[in-house]
Image (cartoon, rainbow, N blue to C red):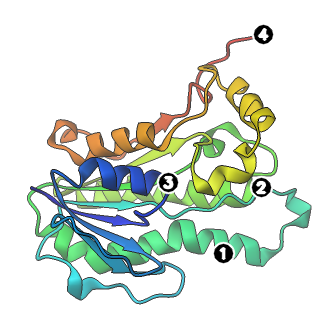
């Protein structure tokens, strides 16, 4: 039974991953509000990546995996985005990841083969209008992940999952009507919107021993959007 820390594991992809792993692994799941659980394999820890102190004392002697889920979706024309918004997006998406990994690095190094997972966005590869803030913050994650994976190989692996728009509470304003949902699905070669469970399955694989020869990679799980052109 592995010890897995999931930052932001009470909503969206993080929640789906928590539900997927809670029967087979010992999970430490952070949330901004205190929660209780009857599952002996599941411990909730209060933590806000933007303002809170990390609850390092509540963690075990080693961590086999860390998954960083917090994210933002600020889609606006560049000329209307204040520098403070860029700073906020960077804080939640990237700086929070850095702070977390600095806190738990000794615990990852104490494990025989640890795995770290972060999340990017298809907009980093594609180049989409109105995505300058979120793509900038997520692009920092992709560059960081490769450097981190190189520095700590072979002891710690790090990979990034880069989804397209996924049906989570964070994306609700883009999917809150049948028309919006249909238009979003049509933009993808596979003609559907991604689900948290699909992304969580990829994360579970990257935490498992089945992926022990994979590190420094960006996995585009995006309905084919970043790679396939189905009409000319």
Name the front one of labels 4 and 2.
2
Q: Earlier in the sequence, mark 1 or mark 2?
A: 2
Q: Earlier in the sequence, mark 3 or mark 1?
A: 3
Residue at 48% over, 60% down: 11
Q: Position of residue 153 (x, y in %)?
A: 22, 54
Q: Which residue is mark 4?
A: 232
Q: Earlier in the sequence, mark 4 or mark 2?
A: 2
Residue at 20% over, 78% down: 59
Residue at far right of view: 79
Residue at 20% over, 64% down: 39
Q: Secondary structure at mark 3?
A: helix
Q: Nearer the viewer, residue 126 or 152?
A: 126
Q: Which residue is mark 2?
A: 75
Kindly report the distance in space between the C-alpha atoms of the residues bearing marks 4 and 3.
34 Å
- Determine whether 144 is above or below 223 in the image: below
Quadrant where the N terminus sits is bottom left
Quadrant where the C terminus sits is top right
Q: Secondary structure at mark 2?
A: loop
Q: Earlier in the sequence, mark 1 or mark 4?
A: 1
Q: Which residue is mark 3?
A: 12
Q: Position of residue 136 (x, y in %)?
A: 66, 58
Dots 1, 2 in contact, CB < 8 A: no
Dots 3, 1 in contact, CB < 8 A: no
């Amino acid at each position: 039974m592995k010890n897995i820390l999931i930052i932001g594991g009470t909503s969206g992809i993080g929640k789906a991953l928590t539900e997927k792993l809670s029967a087979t692994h010992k999970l430490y799941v952070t949330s901004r509000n205190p929660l209780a659980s009857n599952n002996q394999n599941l411990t909730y820890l209060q933590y806000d990546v933007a303002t809170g102190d990390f609850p390092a004392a509540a963690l075990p002697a080693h961590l086999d995996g860390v998954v960083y889920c917090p994210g933002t979706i600020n889609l606006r024309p560049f000329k209307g985005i204040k520098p403070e918004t860029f700073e906020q997006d960077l804080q939640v998406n990237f700086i929070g990841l850095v702070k977390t990994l600095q806190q738990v690095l000794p615990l990852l190094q104490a494990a025989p083969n640890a795995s770290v997972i972060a999340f990017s966005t298809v907009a980093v590869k594609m180049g989409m209008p109105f995505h300058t803030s979120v793509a900038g913050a997520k692009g920092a994650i992709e560059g960081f992940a490769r450097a981190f994976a190189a520095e700590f190989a072979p002891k710690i692996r790090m990979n990034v999952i880069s989804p397209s728009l996924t049906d989570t509470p964070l994306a609700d304003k883009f999917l809150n009507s049948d028309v919006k949902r249909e238009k979003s699905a049509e933009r993808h070669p596979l003609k559907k919107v991604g689900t948290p469970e699909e992304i969580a399955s990829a994360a579970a694989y990257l935490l498992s021993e089945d992926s022990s020869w994979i590190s420094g990679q960006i996995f585009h799980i995006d309905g084919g959007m970043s790679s396939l052109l189905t009409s000319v």
